[in-house]
Amino acid sequence: MEEPIIEVKHLSKQYNIGMDTAYKTLSESFTFAVRHPMKALMDFRRRNETFWALKDVSFEVKRGEVIGIIGRNGAGKSTLLKILSRITYPTEGEIILNGRVGSLLEVGTGFHPELSGRENIYFNGSILGMKKREIDEKFDEIVKFSGVEKFLDTPVKRYSSGMQVRLAFSVAANLEPEILVVDEVLAVGDSVFQKKCLGKMKAASESGRTVLFVSHNMNAVENLCTRAMLLNNGNIICNSYDTREIISKYLNIHDQSNKSSSWINNGKEFLNPWFTLEKIYFTDEFGNIVDDGHFNNKYNYYYNVHGNIRELDPALQVGYALYDEDNNLLFWTNFNDDKEENWPKLSKGKFCFSGLIPKRCLNEGLYRIEPMVSMYFSEWIIQPGVNAPMLYFEITGGLSESPYWLTRRPGILAPLLKWNVKKV
Ligand SMILES: Nc1ncnc2c1ncn2[C@@H]1O[C@H](COP(=O)(O)OP(=O)(O)OP(=O)(O)O)[C@@H](O)[C@H]1O
Ligand SMILES: [Mg+2]
């Protein structure tokens, strides 16, 4: 049997949860402790608290596999990739790599900020163990793919985060490592670049390279990966070649702990200069809040996105994305999907964007709905499938007035359409 290209054996990673204490000097600490003895004690305990980001993780990867690693925020995905890329060390266990790893982790890792784009390409290539001549051969392709030609001699610290990611991805993908490790890069680029990245990863896998890919974008995972692993609280809870099954398990974990019909910002999420998202909830066509998420298809419902417009900008987009139970994206909709003179007039202050969920369009079943907030074509604030809070609703009953067609129908949708029938 062929030896695996990656072997991970009983891997664990422990972190100290070091706190940023508000009081810095000894005398400040002392004063704080005298005034708040309980809190000081808790802080002290917490400072010595440790935390397992990964716990006893084992798996093997065969050459040429494309593995999607999914899981909620904090599940341990990036920690795993960082250990595989040797950016951090495991506390216990070991990894055996039988190939060169090229990795694209967070924005900026692997780049030297003071060096130019050109110098960083050579720097990264040499880390991958490539000779100058080999890098020379790839150089033009890397630059072309990244689209940063004009800034090749500018220090990378002056690049925008999008440019850094483009260059980093281009380097990681084009220098032909045997193992390509990619963490969530698709969240940063624009949609054209996202498509290019997916294409490149697909090509890498088709040419027999091994790819490990962390993403919250389930469509990308499903399209690209031959196998998926679901991480939760530092453990692999499933690992299978049936990627769809793993994805639906993942969405179900969300379901049990977080199958909510409303969402309130704790004040810390989605900070940006333009629009503070405050809460999201459903209402029925009479304006009543629907907090159990149960819809009857006979009625219209509304998805309400409440927020504070802090800086007025015509680029502001607010909408929603709707998914069915199998995570198919059904559609996107936006509040200003009309000619400009018909757009709602916005001003600074609090607004509620109510998006219609039309009656008798969807089938019976469970649906997931996510807000979309962005600055048109320049910046995602809340991106569906990536960082958006999820609400759920379930449609039961009310599909039609016909006695023949009362229950769930074949197909994703169940629209009631007008028919013209005449004698001819
Ligand atoms: N350097 C660190 N020091 C302390 N704790 C850390 C450190 N890095 C990560 N953690 C913690 O380890 C856990 C796993 O983090 P990790 O970044 O691997 O999650 P993730 O699955 O990549 O999440 P996300 O989807 O948000 O990217 C988190 O609880 C995180 O807070
Ligand atoms: Mg991560």
Image: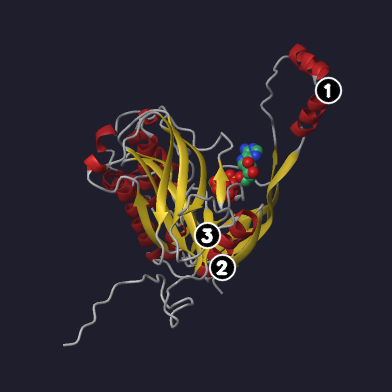
Q: Which mark is residue 393?
A: 3
Q: Which residue is mark 1?
A: 37
Q: Which mark is residue 3?
A: 2
- Which type of secondary structure does the marked residue at label 2 adopt? loop
* Label 2 vs label 3, nearer the camera: 3
Single out the residue that lies furthest toward the left: 424
Compare residues 79 and 352 and report the one nearer the observer.
Answer: 352
In three-dimensional space, the C-alpha distance between marks 1 and 2, rounded to whole angstroms, equals 57 Å
Identify which amino acid the numbered label 3 is placed on: Phe
Identify which amino acid the numbered label 2 is placed on: Glu
Which mark sits nearer the N-terminus, 3 or 1?
1
Q: Residue at x 47, y 55 (%)?
A: 369
Which mark sits nearer the N-terminus, 1 or 2?
2
Compare residues 218 and 90 and report the one nearer the observer.
Answer: 218
* The image quarter in which residue 359 lies: bottom left
Q: Position of residue 248 (x, y in %)?
A: 54, 65
Examine the rendering and report whether any part of residue 351 can be seen. Answer: yes
How dense is the environment of label 1, judged by Cα within 10 Å: few (below 14), some, or many (20 and up)?
few
Which mark sits nearer the N-terminus, 2 or 3?
2
Compare residues 38 and 324 and report the one nearer the observer.
Answer: 324
How dense is the environment of label 2, judged by Cα within 10 Å: few (below 14), some, or many (20 and up)?
few
* The image quarter in which residue 50 lies: top right
Compare residues 143 and 333 and report the one nearer the observer.
Answer: 333
Single out the residue that lies furthest toward the top: 27
In three-dimensional space, the C-alpha distance between marks 3 and 1, rounded to whole angstroms, equals 46 Å
